[in-house]
Image (cartoon, rainbow, N blue to C red):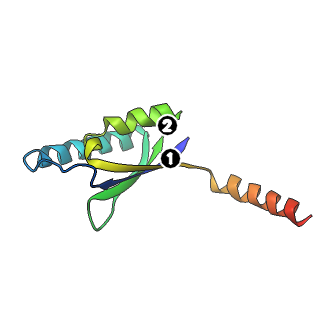
């Protein structure tokens, strides 16, 4: 299953003395996940302090473990959305609307 995982700053302040090491660890963590195929992509928003990944996980529990492992986890607010293939979604919507139209 694929998930859109978004994170935004503000859950707790990052201690300034730990910030450089935490960001370096987060960068390496992300690069490893993309190289392994665990994540399809990872982007940061231009205003800073936030970003998103497309994450591949076999269950909600596996996804939770993945998020909890992120070095910056305690400092972020998280939003997770399960994703559905667009071809499947459009076909299902066509069938639904055809059914509703009678």
Identify the element where label 2 is drawn.
Answer: loop
Among numbered discs 2 and 1, the one appearing first in the sequence:
1
Q: Residue 6: percent from the left, percent from the top?
A: 40, 53
Contact flag, marks 2 and 1 (Cβ < 8 Å): yes
Which image quadrant is residue 68 in? Answer: top left
Identify the element where label 1 is drawn.
Answer: strand
Name the residue tied to disc 2.
57
Name the residue tied to disc 1.
3
- Residue nearer the viewer, 48 or 41: 48
Callout 1 crowding tier (Cα within 10 Å): few <14, some 14–19, many ≥20 = some
Which image quadrant is residue 55 in? Answer: top left
Q: Residue at x 82, y 57 (%)?
A: 95
Q: Residue 14: percent from the left, percent from the top?
A: 17, 49
Quadrant containing the C terminus in the rendered view? bottom right
* Residue farthest along the left direction in this orientation: 17
- Residue nearer the viewer, 68 or 26: 68
- Residue nearer the viewer, 41 or 62: 62
């Amino acid at each position: 299953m694929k998930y859109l995982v978004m994170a935004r700053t503000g859950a707790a302040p990052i201690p300034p003395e730990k910030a450089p090491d935490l960001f370096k660890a987060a960068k390496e963590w992300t690069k490893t996940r993309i190289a392994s195929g665990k994540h399809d992509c990872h982007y940061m928003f231009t205003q800073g302090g936030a970003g998103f990944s497309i994450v591949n996980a076999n269950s909600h529990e596996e996804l939770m473990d993945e998020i909890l492992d992120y070095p910056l986890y305690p400092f972020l607010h998280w939003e997770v959305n399960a994703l559905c293939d667009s071809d499947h979604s459009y076909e299902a919507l066509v069938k639904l609307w055809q059914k509703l139209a009678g």
